[in-house]
Image (tube, rainbow, N blue to C red):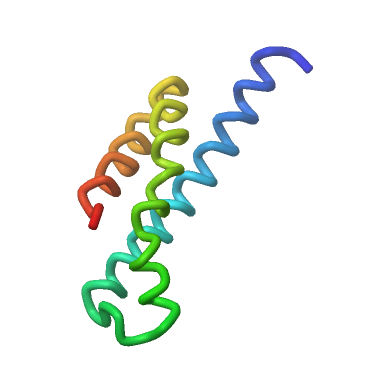
């Protein structure tokens, strides 16, 4: 596989996974603001909330390396919602 094709596939995969992750964090944060610990599954997510942000450590440098600035900005804004 040529190197440029690998990088293109990596960019597509990184973008899709990162935007899905950002959307999931936004949904969790919205539910947390509205319901907090009312439901058991949301209480469980709130308990392990620190670990929900572990993918940022991997995706943010990858987004910067691939020069996807909108993606890097989106991942950085997820850090603002840290509990």
> For this rendering, which residue is in front, 52 or 73?
52
Asked if 70 appears above or below 24 in the picture, the reply is: above
Residue 61 x %, y %: 41, 26
Question: Of all residues shown, which one is farthest toward the bottom?
Answer: 38
Q: Position of residue 33 (x, y in %)?
A: 22, 73
**Front-most of residues 21 and 68:** 21
Q: Position of residue 18 (x, y in %)?
A: 47, 44
From the viewer's perspective, is residue 8 above or below residue 44? above
Q: Residue furthest top?
A: 3
Q: Is residue 17 left or right of residue 54?
A: right
Q: Which quadrant of the figure has residue 63?
A: top left
Residue drawn at x 28%, y 70% as measured from the top left = 30
The tally of labels here is: 0
Q: Position of residue 42 (x, y in %)?
A: 38, 76
Q: Residue at x 78, y 17 (%)?
A: 1
In the picture, which quadrant includes the C terminus?
bottom left
Residue furthest front in the image: 47
Residue closer to the observer: 10 or 61? 61
Identity of the residue drawn at 53% across and 45% down = 16
> Residue drawn 40% across and 40% down?
56
């Amino acid at each position: 596989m040529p190197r440029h094709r690998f990088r293109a596939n990596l960019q597509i995969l990184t973008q899709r996974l990162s935007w899905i992750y950002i959307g999931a964090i936004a949904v969790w944060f919205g539910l947390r603001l509205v319901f907090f610990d009312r439901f058991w599954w949301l209480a469980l997510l709130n308990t392990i909330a620190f670990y929900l942000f572990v993918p940022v450590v991997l995706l943010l440098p990858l987004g910067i390396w691939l020069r996807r600035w909108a993606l890097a900005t989106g991942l950085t804004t997820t850090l603002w919602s840290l509990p």
